[in-house]
Amino acid sequence: MLVLPILAALTASFGWATGIILAQRPAQKLGAFEFTRIQLVACSAILAAISTVMGYWQTVAWGYWPSFAASICFGIVLGNLAMIECLRQGGPRRTELLLSLKAPLVAAMAYLWYGETLSAMDLLGAGIALCGVCLAIFFGTNEKSKSDTATGSLVTVILLGVVATGFQGFGFLIMKPALLAGTEPVAASAIRLLGAAFLISIVALWPAKVFRPHHELTPHLLGRTILPGFIGYGISSTLLLYAFANLEAAIAAVLGSLSPILVLPVLWLREGLVPRVPAILGAILAVLGTAVIVCF
């Protein structure tokens, strides 16, 4: 039944839209490395506990350990470090625009590796949805969000965003065979996070300035760091893994890339920033594109 994986991908988009707004302030205070390290350690512990209680470890197809290793190193560690740095320097909407490139990149990789092809209606729906995403990002609100300030050069932000998008898409796509072999998505997420937390904690032992927090870690800042991490790593990533296992990879990537649309109502509710007419049109196009994918 395709309804559940479609809803899973859409819910993942909403989770990332919320998480990326919540993440920027603590990420700016701690720095990309320390922010990512705290999130990975905390979220891996939470998901490992859930997998243990629910007995999900028994479902893991351990024969696909190279896929797990590649997903950990590239999809989580390198991909998320690049994304957090892009978020710090470019702001949420610019980061989301670059992350929306995940759909065509994943489609190309899925075609090359797994021979996946899309129907004409799927391509049409994906194209309409991506056009809506771009409209929403370029014409989001009349006012500039306090959470959407850019501090880095445009070239740096674009480079970081493209690297993050490519690595994250690769990290999800390479897990598909293990998921099809019966691995529970929660357990898959736990393994990915445990491996990434271990690697990043080893790197953190190197006494380099770039690996040190930029701000003193208080309990309040710790909570503000863990919350968006659990929304993104714990909930959204697990839901998107489930969608990747049950949908064409490109469709899962498109539906999981609608967070720029969903960032707009989050910013509206959080900061009172009313979306502009082109942004509303973009949201309508995204809904229309999703409907074409679902119905045809």
Image: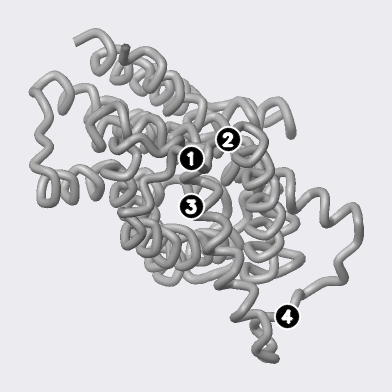
Judged from the image, the secondary structure of the residue bearing numbered disc 1 is helix
Q: Which is in the foreground here, disc 4 or disc 3?
A: 4
The label shown at residue 95 is: 3
What is the residue that sits farthest to the right in this orientation? Answer: 219
Tags 2 and 1 touching, CB below 8 Å: yes
- Could you tell which of marks 4 and 2 lies nearer the N-terminus? 2
Q: What residue is disc 4 on?
A: 212
**279 and 156: which is toward the camera:** 156
Q: Position of residue 24 (x, y in %)?
A: 67, 53
Q: Secondary structure at mark 2?
A: loop
Q: CA distance from mark 4 to mark 3?
A: 24 Å
The circle drawn on residue 58 is 1
The disc, 4 or 3, on the residue closer to the chain's N-terminal end is 3
Q: Element at badge 4?
A: loop
**Residue designated by label 2:** 55
Cα distance, mark 4 to mark 1?
Answer: 38 Å
Three-letter amino acid code of the residue under disc 2: Gly
Residue 242's place in the image compared with 102, above or below, is: above
Query: How many neighbours does mark 4 have within 10 angstroms: few (below 14), some (14-19), or many (20 or more)?
Result: some
Whole-angstrom CA distance, mark 4 to mark 2, is 37 Å
**How far across and how far down the image is residue 270, in percent?**
74, 32
Give the mark nearest the N terminus, 4 or 1. Answer: 1
